[in-house]
Image (spheres, rainbow, N blue to C red):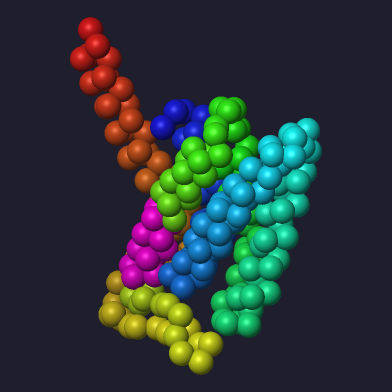
Amino acid sequence: MKSKSFFLYLAAFLVLLIPSPGRFVYGFTLMIELFFLTTLGTLVLVLIKTFKLVELKTVLLLFSLIVISVIFRQIFILLYPEVVLTLGFIIYLPAISTFLICFLYEQKQYETKALIIDNVIRAVIFFVFGTVFFLFRDVVGYGTITFFGKHHQIFEKVLFNSEQIGIFSFLASVPGSLLLSALIIFIHLTVRKKFKIISNYLQQ
């Protein structure tokens, strides 16, 4: 991953994951929304190129992403209103993250198929990373796993008493999320640096 791409992922990660509640069910909802936004947003981008509206690309993309977010919210509030009401304005943040990781610096002249594949791969990477992040926060921070339950209710499975390891509940808070993100970023930068050193050594 190039440096610019990494920082775009970082910005998208911070925008979406840091202010979100630490329960898995909320994070998984946001990851589903982000995946749909990426897929449908890519199709919108293809239409923009097809009808040669490139000059209006940014405006049309942002408008489309916002509309898709609103529709997603209205559909989901019928299924799990508690999730939507708890997320509040956060449910619109995947639109920003999607724009950052898939559309902001699109410089290559992709063919339609290649463009779709590239953006879906990016969305899958973010989906997996975000899902693991929220699952970790839920399990370690609260000692639970939350998911979509029956009758439009949230299902919660208690794994252990979180009060017995209260120090880990910090990871479920916003400051804890920031600390956890910083740790992940540090590890990522360290690994990238090591690989770069090895790559330069092998090229000599």
Q: Position of residue 128 (x, y in %)?
A: 39, 55
Answer with left or right where residue 154 lies relative to residue 57. Answer: left
Image vertical order of residue 163 relative to residue 98, above or below: below
Image vertical order of residue 151 relative to residue 21, above or below: below
At 68% from the left and 45% from the top, the residue drawn is 47
Q: Position of residue 175 (x, y in %)?
A: 49, 57
Residue 167 can be seen, yes or no = no
Answer with left or right where residue 88 lies relative to residue 52. Answer: left
At 23% from the left and 7% from the top, the residue drawn is 204
Q: Furthest-front residue in view?
A: 50
Q: How many numbered callouts?
A: 0
Image vertical order of residue 189 relative to residue 175, above or below: above
Q: Is residue 158 magenta?
A: no
Our reading of the magenta stretch's main secondary structure is helix
The N terminus sits in image quarter:
top left
Compare residues 14 and 120 and report the one nearer the observer.
120
Location of residue 94 (image quadrant): bottom right
Q: Furthest-top residue in view?
A: 204
Q: Is residue 137 magenta?
A: yes
Per the rendered image, the range of residues in magenta is 128-140
At 48% from the left and 84% from the top, the residue drawn is 154
Image vertical order of residue 188 relative to residue 166, above or below: above
Q: Position of residue 71 (x, y in %)?
A: 69, 68
At 41% from the left and 77% from the top, the residue drawn is 146
Residue 81 can be seen, yes or no = yes
Q: Position of residue 80 (x, y in %)?
A: 57, 81
